Image (cartoon, grey):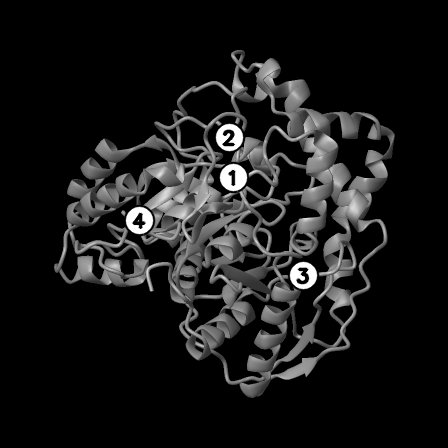
Amino acid sequence: MTQTQERVHAIADDALGTDDATAVAARIRAGEISPREAVEAALARVRSVEALGAVTVWDDERALRRADALGTGGAGAFHGVPCAIKENVLAAGLPIRMGSEAVPDTLVTKDGGVATQLLATGALPVVQTTCPPFGWTATTERVGPLNTLNPWHTGYSAGGSSGGTAALVAAGALPFGHGNDGGGSIRIPAAACGLVGLKATRGRFAADSTTTRMPVKIVVDGVLTRTVRDTARYFAAAEAQQPAKGWERVGLVEGPAERRLRVGVLVDSPLAPATDDETAVAVRQTADLLATLGHRIDDSYSPAVPAAFKEDFLHYWSMLAFAIHRDGPRMFGPAFDRSRLDPFTLGLSRYFARRVYRFPYTLARTAAAGAVYDRTLGDVDVVLTPVLTHTTPQIGYLAADLDFETHLERVSAYVGFTPLHNVTGAPAISLPLGRTSDGRPIGVMIQARRGQDRMLLELAHELEAAAPFARVWD
């Protein structure tokens, strides 16, 4: 581990170098390194940054066995590339602890759709990574000693809920890793840790039974990466493994398009306090960059977000906590212990219980939100916004043992942009195009209509080429 002024990275002179997942896979296919060498290097790197608090379970022995069985000649997009898998999906041989002390350590016996899709790319999970209790919040902190720290500055949050994966990928310990997004949980840690985080159109990627049972399927799985090409390659591989029903196939997006776009710019969320100055500067600088690239900027864009949206999202979100509080033993087994639920889960459950009579109306509006969202874009092709209303907070700002009202007020003010796309099903991507005055990443977000994932990936390629992303070891 290298550490300078609270900045941490795991880059070493080993088989992984500073390569992204695409380059590591290419070197394995060429026979320059073996899957075992890649996995051994990754395991050593993850151990070197254990202080980040990003790992819940080591899967090293199985990863090495899988590496030896693979060899170098596989066709998978990420054949032999070590990665992480988040602790809230069904992966055979691993527990699904959901970041909560209430959930027992029962091992899953069969891969769910998410793990199946990840493994089909040839990737090799070497660790299971942290999330906050049930993924509710925008940091990866939990009751007790396990907080996940940001490698750019260990006094700050790594974001949430996919913060464990984000911390390891940003630190260079792993080339890429799995995350999922039910209210911003890929895009938020991507913004905090300086990564690329795509929340794809609903239905593009495989899902687990834990999320497909939701009345509105707000959770989308995916990956956190250091390069746009890794995100695009995973998208294409996932699409090939399980084509999305109802959407035109995107294929591998390898660069920008010639078409120039009309870009709506929105600095302040209609659902949260005004965006802070450093974040606003990052958005305006990105708008200026897009203008120099020939895109048409619409600074007057103003979305017609329904007045009930914020309350509807909170009501739906709290319904999920209520279901866990009430039906946890059925969901997670008889050893589920309600007495160990965290304050935020309990608070959300109480919030829903007081408003349960409203749920039919909330559900109806939420189910119709996708078509409403597409219309709100008007004559713009994409919309540029912050990912978050203010820069990444320090550890403790969203602590798991905060009283519910304080936590809810803080997180609601912070995540003023991301939940919209989970409710509507629209795609959005976080790109690390801004920096704070002390050098930490700021993410900006580009969003499009449902099904327009290719447009986002093309534009992301163009922005990365024009303004290469900083790395924590630079």
Q: As drawn, is 355 to the left or to the right of 119?
A: right
Dot 1 corresponds to which residue?
Answer: 140
Front position among marks 1 and 3: 3
Q: Are marks 4 and 3 in contact (CB under 8 Å)?
A: no
Q: Are marks 2 and 1 in contact (CB under 8 Å)?
A: yes
Task: Indicate the position of residue 379 as horizontal and vertical percent values.
Answer: 74, 77
Say what secondary structure mark 4 lies in: loop
Dot 3 corresponds to which residue?
Answer: 276
- Gap between marks 3 and 2, in whole Å? 30 Å
Q: Is residue 64 above or below residue 232?
A: above
Of residues 43 and 425, the one nearer the viewer is 43
The disc, 1 or 4, on the residue closer to the chain's N-terminal end is 1
* Amino acid identity at mark 4: Ala
* Amino acid identity at mark 3: Asp
Front position among marks 3 and 2: 3
In which quarter of the view is residue 53 placed? Answer: top left
Q: As drawn, is 11 to the left or to the right of 380?
A: left
